[in-house]
Amino acid sequence: MRIASNGVRTIIVETANRFARDLIVQETGYGILKERGIDLIAADKPDAFLDDTPTAKLIRQVLGAVSEFEKAMVVSKLKGARDRKRATGVKVEGRKNYAEINPEMVALAKKLRRYKVQGRKRTLREIAGELAQAEFVTDTGKPYAAAAIARMIEA
């Protein structure tokens, strides 16, 4: 174990629920650390993991169960909100594609790909160059890469 090999003897976490939001994970993790002689300290309640009395253990486990419940409630609320939004036909997850960010740029890229120049289709790099001339560039001001142009055309 890396912690044992580098001499760590104490781990400080912001709160007990930042160590684990699942009661079994919290107690198992605490047990493993204790077996290895490593102290676990929650900054908000320093004695939570240091006291080994039955009362301290009960309080730690009850608070762990409350944290697990809160996590489940947040997950449930977020899922419900995503499902409601998805039901309206709106995209809810994942990053936006180029067509959603800048439909004019995608339309121009597709148009440039369709129309031939001197009897041949433009290469993806040529399309990137023409988009740059039309002031469609990346956030860093550079022309789009060929792979990005390919994704635009597929969109």
Image (spheres, grey):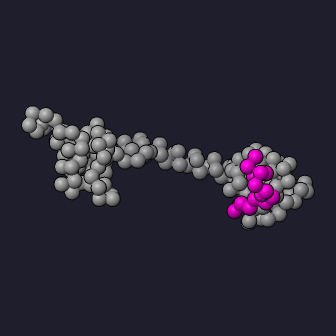
- Coordinates of residue 62 in the picture (x, y in percent): 78, 53
Report which quarter residue 25 is drawn in.
Answer: top right
Tell me which residue sits at (47%, 42%) in the image. Answer: 83
- Coordinates of residue 128 in the picture (x, y in percent): 23, 47
- Residue 51 included in the magenta stretch of the image: no
Up the image or down, 61 lies above or below 120; here it is below
- Coordinates of residue 20 in the picture (x, y in percent): 70, 51
Tell me which residue sits at (16%, 35%) in the image. Answer: 121
Up the image or down, 155 lies above or below 26; here it is above
Task: Please report the bounds of the magenta region as a residue range.
Answer: 1-15
Nearest the eye: 60 or 141:
141
Query: From the viewer's perspective, is 44 left or right of 108?
Result: right
Tell me which residue sits at (18%, 49%) in the image. Answer: 130
Report which quarter residue 94 is drawn in.
Answer: top left
Report whether residue 59 is seen. no
Report the number of discs: 0
Up the image or down, 77 lies above or below 118; here it is below
Up the image or down, 146 lies above or below 66; here it is above
Query: From the viewer's perspective, is 7 left or right of 83?
Result: right
Nearest the eye: 146 or 87:
146
Nearest the eye: 53 or 97:
97
Report whether residue 90 is seen. yes
